[in-house]
Amino acid sequence: MALRCCFRRLAAVTSQAAKYAYQFDKDLNAVDEFGFTACMESVSRTGQAATATQVTELVQYLADIGVPIDEVDVRGRTPIQLGDLSYIDMPIQRMADILISRGITPKHLPKEYIKPAAP
């Protein structure tokens, strides 16, 4: 709950703040009354006050510690869809890339998804 609460209280949550909150509560699947996970909070609420780079770093950190990044809220929206509403392309592009690199087909791709170049 501390990790998700961190996002509700701060205007711009950085990966450093999330790391600090994670020390106190390691519940990676915590959701609020709207079904928002920490990843959903990162792209919908913090995107208003944080830079795209900060939100992308945060998304990467959350994915690295195991926070679900393709779950749906009570209205059936994924973090990628919520990010599309906020017009923050870099973090939601990163979410899609993370899922694809893990062999997971995202439930929804970003509106302007750019397929990574083959290695």
Image (cartoon, grey):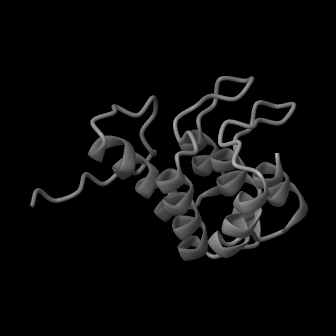
Q: Which of these two is toward me, 67 or 111?
A: 67
| Residue 80, position as x, y percentages in the image | 54, 44
The residue that appears at 59% across and 74% down in the rendered structure is: 54
Query: Where's residue 70, x and y in %?
Result: 52, 35
The image shows residue 112, relative to residue 9, as above or below, that is above
Residue 40 in the image: state x and y as whole percent. 67, 45
What is the quadrant of the C terminus in the image? bottom left
Vertical placement of residue 58 versus 41, above or below: below
- Residue at image coords 52%, 66%: 56
Between 92 and 68, which is closer to the camera in this rendering?
68
Tell me where residue 49 sits by quadrant. bottom right
Spot occupied by residue 88 in the image (x, y as percentages of width and height): 57, 61
Residue extending farthest to the left is 119
Q: Quadrant of residue 21?
A: bottom right
Query: What residue is rendered at 63% in x and 31% in y?
Result: 77
Q: Quadrant of the N terminus?
A: top right
Task: State the residue at coordinates (57%, 48%).
Answer: 84
Q: How many labels sit on residues? A: 0
Q: Nearer the viewer, residue 97 or 19?
A: 19
Query: Height in image: 76 above or below 83?
Result: above
